């Protein structure tokens, strides 16, 4: 059934399913700071198993998970190489500098997908003048590049080459399960060569709160300390972890629906005058649409859409991000296309003057 409000702002806006709510209500809990919450422990064990890692750590958010990884892998004064549109650079409030003492070294890549050819000139060793490279960070899927996906061969080469130089590689895998579905490869296959991986439970997988950081036992032991330092000790967090376990069980199997809805939207958007998008590049659940041809800013269009019960955010004055998720169905997508045509003063499709 179509929603009263169609919320395309992000896949973070999803509501927990009835199954999740039941699991949360019935969750067995303990004090997780003492590592005594059995539900949190089960979630961490399950996550470590899914990614073929020795250990895992439940954290409140992906931002905290990424920051913990950066802090563990680096020393103050080092650089973190990342793509220009990376979440850690654009949407984590400068935390790598404020807390981890690192500075970003950004690199622009087509569709947000870095290659070793682009990274290698930016890697810096010990120097009397230059900041040393402490970490390479990749994001899969690439959020602000329209949900693009790293080919396994590309990310594997980056890891291999970086490791030969003694540089660790962290994966912001907030939507790694979307990448897994798009490529038809397991998350363990896509991420096995990274030194650490963060993935979100609260995006496409549909949980209300939480992310997980996975890696080696020594890495996770250090991560525990940094999580506490950041105020991430959540005590009886099994109530939240229970929803995360359901998300891991049920979420990945239905992500192809979100991808199909995103493709449907992209094809419809491409037919609207003034909008530019290449549907062939939409492979997961995120669309970045170019609006400069409409004569309106993305923020003006957002207001017009909101007046019709459709929510979508401008990223820049000329671009807008649209994200499909578990609470969006095909009727919602059809309604959104009609609303956008109305917002732009374009006749509904099929109507003849």
Image: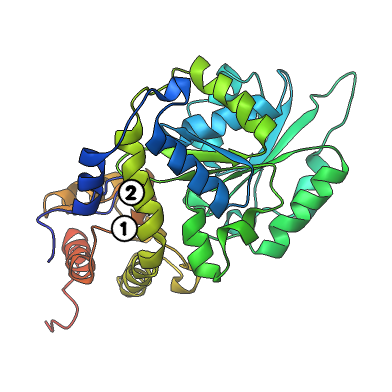
Q: Is residue 104 left or right of residue 227?
A: right
Distance Cα–Cα, label 2 vs label 1: 8 Å
Q: Is residue 317 visible?
A: no
Q: Is residue 2 left or right of residue 268?
A: left
Q: Is residue 64 left or right of residue 53?
A: left
**Residue tagged by mark 2?**
10
* Residue at the image point whose x is 40% and y is 35% from the top: 38
Where does the image place residue 192, in percent across and percent down from the top left?
Answer: 67, 53
| 251 w.r.t. 241: above or below | below
Disc 2 secondary structure class: loop
Q: Residues within 10 Å of mark 2 (few under 14, many from 20)?
A: some
* Residue at the image point whose x is 72% and y is 51% from the top: 193
Q: Nearer the viewer, residue 105 or 24?
A: 24
* Residue at the image point whose x is 90% and y is 18% from the top: 128
Labels 2 and 1 touching (C-beta < 8 A): yes
Location of the C terminus (image quadrant)? bottom left
Where does the image place residue 223, in percent across and percent down from the top left?
Answer: 59, 27
* Residue at the image point whose x is 63% and y is 46% from the top: 53
**Residue tagged by mark 1?**
325
């Amino acid at each position: 059934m179509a929603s009263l409000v169609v919320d395309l702002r992000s896949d973070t806006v999803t509501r927990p399913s009835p199954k999740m709510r039941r699991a949360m209500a019935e969750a067995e809990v303990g004090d997780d700071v003492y590592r005594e919450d059995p539900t949190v422990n089960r979630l961490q064990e399950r996550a470590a198993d899914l990614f073929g890692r020795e250990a895992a750590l439940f954290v409140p958010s992906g931002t905290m998970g990424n920051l913990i990884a950066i802090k563990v892998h680096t020393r103050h004064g080092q650089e973190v190489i990342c793509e220009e549109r990376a979440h850690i650079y654009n949407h984590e409030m400068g935390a790598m500098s404020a807390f981890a003492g690192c500075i970003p070294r950004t690199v622009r890549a087509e569709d947000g997908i870095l290659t070793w050819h682009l990274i290698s000139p930016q890697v810096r060793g010990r120097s009397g003048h230059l900041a040393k490279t402490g970490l390479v960070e990749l994001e899969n899927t690439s959020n602000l590049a329209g949900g693009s996906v790293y080919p396994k061969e590309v990310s594997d080469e980056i890891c291999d080459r970086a490791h030969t130089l003694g540089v660790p590689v962290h994966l912001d895998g907030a939507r790694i399960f979307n990448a897994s579905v798009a490529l038809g490869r397991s998350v363990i296959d896509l991420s096995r060569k990274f030194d650490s991986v963060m993935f979100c439970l609260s995006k496409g997988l549909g949980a209300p709160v939480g992310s997980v950081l996975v890696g080696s036992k020594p890495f996770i032991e250090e991560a525990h300390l940094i999580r506490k330092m950041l105020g991430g000790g959540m005590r009886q967090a099994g109530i939240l972890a229970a929803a995360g376990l359901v998300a891991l069980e049920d979420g990945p199997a239905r992500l192809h629906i979100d991808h199909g809805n995103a493709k449907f939207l992209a094809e419809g958007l491409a037919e609207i005058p003034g909008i530019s998008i290449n549907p062939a590049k939409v492979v997961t659940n995120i669309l970045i649409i170019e609006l400069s041809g409409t004569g309106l800013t993305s923020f003006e269009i957002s207001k017009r859409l909101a007046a019709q019960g459709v929510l979508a955010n401008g990223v820049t004055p000329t671009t807008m991000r649209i994200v499909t998720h578990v609470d969006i169905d095909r009727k919602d997508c059809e309604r959104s296309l009609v609303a956008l045509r109305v917002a732009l003063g374009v006749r509904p499709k099929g109507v003849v003057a």
